[in-house]
Image (tube, grey):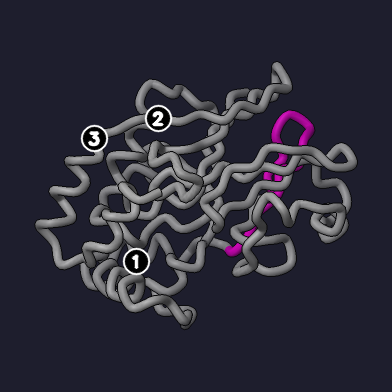
Amino acid sequence: MRIGILSDVHSNLFALRSVLEDSNFDLILHAGDVVGYNPFPNEVINQFRKHDVISILGNHDKAVIGSAKYNFPDYVDKAIQWSKKNLSEENTHYLKQLQSSNSIEVDGKVLRLVHGSPSDPNEYVYPTDVTLDLVNNLDTGVDVLIWGHTHYPIITKINDVSLLNPGSVGQPRDGDWRACYIEYNTSESSITLHREKYDLEALRKKHKRTSLPKEIVERFYQE
């Protein structure tokens, strides 16, 4: 089975399309933050529905539906408020029904999906934080831990547990602006990081036609 492992799409329709185009995944998992930052919250959720993406709730998703308060920088909070105003009622309901974590069994493997860490959905787990403690906080029987939140990709293994952060589809922060995701092939036992280009200038032009803060799209050119 070919599994697409995504995270932090953040309303970036162009980036999401570049990942889904001709991918032919058997299953798509998303580790939270469907919306926020970018100008296509409804279109992205529609794509999630179309492709039967299994997603959990991220901190930006929680803020948009008003179920949590965060001390975001001013420009991020403005983007949250923009998303909240522009999200349809139907798609607000979509976010509200998402769980904070999920476990899926595929081909005899248990995949655990969280946003931050197994113990805290708001914790940032960067490459230097991947230690035995991360595995010890997992429920017994988990074969693959998948998380997002940092926008930094990680592929490693500790004590026979595969630890995967697919980075960010919509706004990577590791110096490469291209949409980032992981393909996990259970038949071949292979795990591969992928990057996909898309029309960044078209995204920038769309931003300019909205009231979203300019700092958001400028980050793509800085990182």
Of residues 69 and 110, which is closer to you in this image?
69
Choose mark 1 or mark 3, whichever is in front.
3
Give the residue pinned by disc 2: 196
What residue type is disc 2 on? Glu
Q: Residue 92 bears which disc, if any?
A: 1
- Of mark 2 and mark 1, the one earlier in the sequence is 1
What residue type is disc 1 on? Thr
Of residues 111 and 218, which is closer to you in this image?
218
Residue located at (70% from left, 18% from top): 187
Secondary structure of the residue carrying tag 3 is loop
Up the image or down, 202 lies above or below 137; here it is: above
Q: Residue 199 bears which disc, if any?
A: 3
Q: How many labels does the image show?
A: 3
Magenta stretch? 100-112
Of residues 169 and 1, which is closer to you in this image?
169
In this rendering, does residue 17 appear at all?
yes
Choose mark 2 or mark 1, whichever is in front.
2
What residue type is disc 3 on? Asp
**Crowding at mark 3 (Cα within 10 Å: few <14, some 14-19, many 20+):** few
